[in-house]
Image: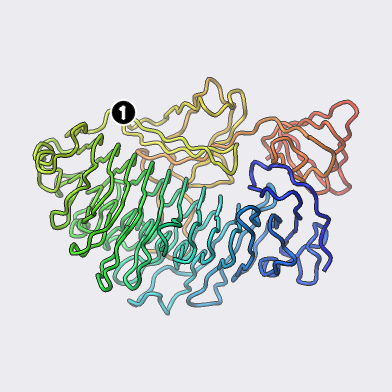
Amino acid sequence: MKNPTRVVLFLCASVFFSSSLFAASWYVSVSGSNSAVGSFQNPWSLAYALSRPATVVLPGDTIWVRGGTYVAPFSSTLSGTAVSPITVCNFPNERPTLLGNAAIVTNQVILTIHGQYTHYMGLEVTSNPVTRISIGNTDPPTDIYYATGIAVYGPSTKIINCVVHNCPGGGMGYWSTSTNAEVYGCLFFNNGYSNTVRGHGPQIYVQNNDETKPKSIVNSFIFNGFSLGIQFYSSSSDVMRGLTIDSCTVFNSGANTNPLQARRMNLLAGSANSTGGFKVRRLKVMHNVFYRDTTDNTAPQYIPYSSNRKNVELGTEDETLTDADVDFNHNHLYGDPTPLLLHTWDSGSFTNNFLYAYRSNNTIDRYVLEQLNDSPPFKVWDFNTYYTNQPSFNGAFDGRSFAEWKSTYHIDTNSVYTNSNPTNNYYFVRPNKYDSNKYYVTVQNYLGQNQVSVPLSTTGFDGTSYAVYDVQYSLLIPVDTGTLNGQNLPLNMALTNVAPLVGIAPVAPKHSSKTLGTFIVEFYPECKTIKPGNWGDPTIWENGKVPNCYSRVKVLHNVIVISNAWCKSVEVDTGATLTVKSAVLLNIGKQ
């Protein structure tokens, strides 16, 4: 088969390219075929592209996936190298959707990843089940369409800026062999199903079999599922070794299951089965927000399930086992009724965390921390902030007062406990390392304001136009646009629109209360060409990104538009030409 011409690649802000000097660009479309050559004009099918041998798709190559719907299942065996990974990426300004095949009743995986050193970027993975309610009590169910979004087996794999939603079997199986892997900048929501007992299908089910090659989940939003948010778990093998969770916002896990069933934890790290002595090792949880909405489950019928509704659970339930090496630092835990359940660990640190136990009525004690069987805390435990919202309650530490807690364990010397509501808002602003124009923002709006201004002094985008997207609603329809002025960005905290749940479910998803805001802010600096070429080629643009409807474009070279394109404004420099091909539209100032 003839390869496309290999060219030198320029660094692209939205795509991580390798350090390989020469690499090829291949193309995929919904109308592509197995007999094509993989060029822009003659693209492959997606299934064919993902199965290309190493003699065709080489380390450092990029497979551009055009917009449209691709019917699953798909399996990838692509393999790059540590120095030159392969990239499978959405074509600029287009949205490829991998859709589960509802004709398959059970046990489908929409995208299965083998191979290694391959980055999957900008893909939507979803399905269209008729119902999310199983009338049986088997897992997986046999009476409803059941599909998992992504199953990762290949080591050194990256899932970047993808959206995984409405998959009844769960969002992702992040399996033990996929060591040294990364999930970054992704959204997981509305995944799972409900049966007669409880919700099933975690948003991310994680295992790892080598603590020297830990995997990570970073800078992602995980919310509104039927079951757990992140589950680092095993009951049959020793695969809870090596996981980092950093800068994520995980909230309202289990919110879509039967209202009379227990809600689930945002993070569970551990096992209930002690057979074989399986333990958690090398767990790092840093700079995350774990949130449970206090407007959910307030009726009396939910009270019997309060013991299952912890926000975060750390460790193996069998207290004869001692889990090892956990670092839980700079995390923000909020919600109903208990932020943290702790098991026995032999080493670790718990510092600079914020825990707020809130309950909208006085029926249930609101511990900020609960110890199973009096499991002792880690020795390094300090500089934390604790809140409860019931002034008459003084046993927030598993029945102990704060003074008793400190004197019993000789910890928290520099920590603060307050038996009232917080009096400040908190915000968390995180740049996207694979897309320099995007920032992920989480706001804890304890003052209950309808609008919160978040400073963005370190972005360098003052005077630049922006669009704000509500993570819980849509990444295609902005909730606000404007120009950054004075480095303060006003964010609407009273939003109510939410992305719909596909299929019949016990309850419809709802937006979080205004206590929590979750946003992606995208900036649109001026786009300048650095060489002549095709408008849709990201390498001709100074910032490595093809312009979209918010971009101010300056054409300094000869450019041709061969497919429909958008921009906010365009200026053509003297001596340069901008040619729009016949029957193609260049939409200026239109969305």
Looking at the image, which is closer to me, 489 or 53?
53
Q: Quick check: 160 left or right of 259?
A: right
In the picture, residue 308 is in which quadrant? bottom left
Say which residue appears at 66% left-offset and 49% top-offset: 18
In the rendered view, tell whether residue 318 sits above or below residue 284.
Answer: below
In which quadrant will I find the N terminus? bottom right
Q: Residue furthest right?
A: 575
Give the image location of residue 414, x and y in percent: 21, 31
Q: Nearer the viewer, residue 398 or 22?
A: 22
Q: Is residue 358 visible?
A: no
Image quarter of the C terminus: top right
Measured from the top left, where is residue 174 in percent x and y? 46, 62
Height in image: 53 above or below 143? Answer: above
Q: Nearer the viewer, residue 202 or 348?
A: 348
Give the left or right position of residue 421, taking residue 233 as reference: left
Q: At 31% across and 33% down in the image, what residue appears?
A: 446
| Residue pictured at 31% horizontal, 48% vertical | 292
Residue at the spot of label 1: 424
Label 1 sits on what residue type? Asn
Q: Is residue 294 left or right of residue 494?
A: left
How many marks can you see? 1
Label 1: how many Cα within 10 Å (few below 14, some 14–19, many 20+): few
Residue 284 drawn at (x, y percent): 36, 49
Secondary element under disc 1, as helix, strand or loop, is: loop
Specify the farthest residue to the front.
212
At 29% from the left and 58% from the top, the residue drawn is: 263
Residue 395 seen in this snapshot: yes
In this picture, residue 45 sits left or right of residue 559 = left
